[in-house]
Amino acid sequence: MQPTMCATASILHGSLQGYVLVALLLFVIGLFIVLSRRSVLIQFMGVELMLNAANVALLAFARHWNGDVQGTVFYLFIIAVAACEAAVGLALVVGLFRHRQTTDSDRADALKL
Amino acid sequence: MFLIFALITLLGALSVAFQKNLVVAGLCMVITFFGVAGLYLLLANPVAAALQIIVYSGAIVVLLLFVIMLLSAHEEEDAQSVHSVQRWGSVAAALALAAGVVKVVLSSGFLRGAASGPAPANMNLERVGTALFAEHLVAFEAVGLLLLAAMIGAVTLVKKDL
């Protein structure tokens, strides 16, 4: 019983376990958004949340690896790729809306224009 | 403090999941991103926190809100049919994954054993910049090219007649 209580307290005060738990739960919520919602824009938000969850885990591990600087450098690259992904993804949504007048992923289910 | 920022992050994400209005969902994303930035601050990484606020809550959410307004997507009517399989399937999948994740993290000896020794120094921009330009110069240039390619690609996709 005692170790369990101790582990819970250390999670609540931000041990590595706590950060990894938050990151994984954020990822699950993002996945839930992508699976359950049908607006393409909301699904895009879910993808961004999943990307953020990966970043949280990366920086938490970097911090507990003696505060390694490589983690932050890699985070910089991830954020650049995320910006590219946002720009191209939203351009795709706009293109979809041009052709279909909808952002509902259920109404854009044909493979041809 | 950790608990506060973790709750801000997770509740913001959950409110995105259950929000009907697209604009409000975008604003909930901002809350989530600020929570994540707070987590980075607690990880003694103010560089990452500043980047998070500038790029995510600044650029990406603004771009997203622009697109929502441009398409008037928040005024679009709801889908006619509700797929109960999709709804309950995603709920079940998310709950199962969340339970599995909690169990794995709580029972992981590696994560529990990773008690931090002496707290490392705060991350500062000088260390990041030195590592970036001394060891990752090629990757830095490649990211510049990637951004250019994404910009041209986005313009090409959106433009009506090129």
Image (tube, rainbow, N blue to C red):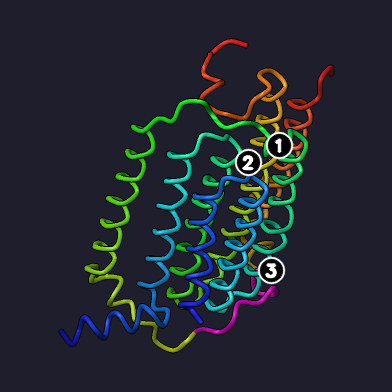
Q: Earlier in the sequence, mark 3 or mark 1?
A: 3
Q: Rounded to the nearest whole Å, what is the CA distance between mark 3 and mark 1?
A: 23 Å
Q: Is residue B42 left or right of residue B107?
A: right
Residue drawn at the location 54% of the way across and 78% of the way down: B42
Q: Quadrant of the N terminus of chain A?
A: bottom left
Q: Pointer 3: residues within 10 angstroms few (<14), some, or many (20+)?
A: some
Indicate the position of residue A15 as horizontal and vertical percent values.
39, 78
Q: Which residue is mark 3?
A: B50
Residue drawn at the location 77% of the way across and 26% of the way down: B156
Q: Nearer the viewer, residue B24 or B47?
A: B24
Q: Rounded to the nearest whole Å, what is the CA distance between mark 2 and mark 1?
A: 8 Å
Residue type at tag 2: Glu
**Among all residues in the image, which is located at the extreme left?**
A1
> Which is more foreground, mark 2 or mark 1?
2
Judge if badges 2 and 3 mark residues of a common chain: no
Q: Which residue is mark 2?
A: A85
Q: Pointer 1: residues within 10 angstroms few (<14), some, or many (20+)?
A: many
Residue drawn at the location 31% of the way across and 44% of the way down: B93
SS type, badge 1: helix
Q: Nearer the viewer, residue A84 or B25?
A: B25
**Among all residues in the image, which is located at the extreme right?**
B162
Q: CB of mark 2 within 8 Å of CB of mark 1?
A: yes
Q: Is residue B154 left or right of residue A60?
A: right
**Among all residues in the image, which is located at the extreme top?**
A112
Residue type at tag 1: Ala
Q: Which residue is mark 1?
A: B150
- Residue B102 is drawn in which quadrant? bottom left
Q: Which mark is residue A66?
A: none
Q: Chain of mark 2?
A: A
Q: Pointer 2: residues within 10 angstroms few (<14), some, or many (20+)?
A: some
Indicate the position of residue B5 as horizontal and vertical percent values.
52, 73
Q: Classify A52 as above or below A4.
A: above
